Image (cartoon, rainbow, N blue to C red):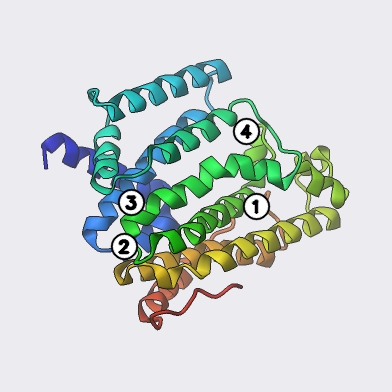
Amino acid sequence: MTGDLERSYRHCRMLHRVHGRTYYLATMLLPAWKRRHVSALYGFTRHTDDIVDHLGEESRVDRALRLRRWSERFTAALDGGRTGDDPVLPAVLHTIGVFGLEREDFVAFLRSMTMDLTVTGYDTYDDLLEYMEGSAAAIGSMMLPILGAADPAAAREPARQLGLAFQLTNFIRDVGEDLDRGRIYLPRKDLARFGVTRDDLHARRVSPAVRDLLAFEIERARRHYAVAGTGIPLLTPTSRACIRTAHLLYGGILTEVERAGYDVFRRRATVPRRRRLAVAVRSLLARPGRPAPVW
């Protein structure tokens, strides 16, 4: 492995360790040769997300230009162009080549990131799912060849569902942060169903209506987790503990939101460190073929 490629993998691992702590802990249960490829995908998605969500003085037009240039650079590199001194591209391109990852998944991801620059809300959950097809389900598809499965066709939908579950968990946990970015990912139809307005969310007060709305979204997320859990026994044995741990820890964020009285405005819900480590140990000891539980 060349020095540039090794440095790129180290950079992606740093991004993963600093910004994706829960997921990073879970990936420590993977064989080392798989971990670097997971970090490469994380580095690619994180770098792209940081362009879109930059909260400094950069205008939306400037961010759109940066995203377009990044997308064009990535596409050109996929087609055999040079990566230059980009710290992320060598690792992600190497990972794509090693596993033959589908180009369309990356195109879908970049399409959804572009939507974030102009779309500030979604009318229905079906509308939101169109966005999440690229921002979440496609990432599950990217991950599956790295994780490995005896029957990839059977494991594909649970992998996609896990991506959706993780994404919806983020939307629930990060309502306050997303408001700061001018976005509300909870569908307008759901807000109307529980009598919640945009102003209610901007007030950052956990009214009974807001509490009921978040409880509804949590149950929806858990249905995604239930489907995703059935795919864990289908994975290569060396990948099961990692995904079981990620499944339990991300799902545990929903429990923490409930324990906090659904207050997603004053602090970010996190699973305590001691519980994270205990889940990792239990995942290592889980019986083969056992699906992950739903909370």
Q: Is residue 170 visible?
A: yes
**What's under tag 4, amino acid-wise?**
Arg
Work out how far the residue at label 3 is from the one at label 2, CA to CA, in angstroms. 11 Å
Work out how far the residue at label 3 is from the one at label 4, CA to CA, in angstroms. 28 Å
Instruction: From the image, tell me which residue sits under label 1.
Output: 172
Residue 265 vertical position relative to residue 114 in the rendered view, above or below: below
Residue 202 is left or right of residue 25, and the answer is: right
**What's under tag 3, amino acid-wise?**
Val
Q: Position of residue 234 (x, y in %)?
A: 41, 69
Name the foreground residue: 220 vs 262. 220
Q: Position of residue 154 (x, y in %)?
A: 45, 63
Work out how far the residue at label 3 is from the one at label 1, CA to CA, in angstroms. 25 Å
If you read the primary sequence from the N terminus, does the residue marked by circle 1 or circle 2 appear first? Answer: 2
Label 4: how many Cα within 10 Å (few below 14, some 14–19, many 20+): some
The local secondary structure at tag 1 comes to helix
- Label 3–label 1 contact, CB within 8 A: no
If you read the primary sequence from the N terminus, does the residue marked by circle 3 or circle 2 appear first? Answer: 2
Instruction: From the image, tell me which residue sits under label 4.
Output: 181
Instruction: From the image, tell me which residue sits under label 3.
Output: 38
Name the foreground residue: 193 vs 174. 193
Instruction: From the image, tell me which residue sits under label 2.
Output: 28
Front position among marks 3 and 1: 3
Residue 79 is left or right of residue 259, and the answer is: left
The local secondary structure at tag 2 comes to loop
If you read the primary sequence from the N terminus, does the residue marked by circle 3 or circle 4 appear first? Answer: 3
Work out how far the residue at label 1 is from the one at label 4, CA to CA, in angstroms. 15 Å
The residue at the far left in this view is 2
The local secondary structure at tag 3 comes to helix
Q: Position of residue 182 (x, y in %)?
A: 67, 32
**What's under tag 2, amino acid-wise?**
Met
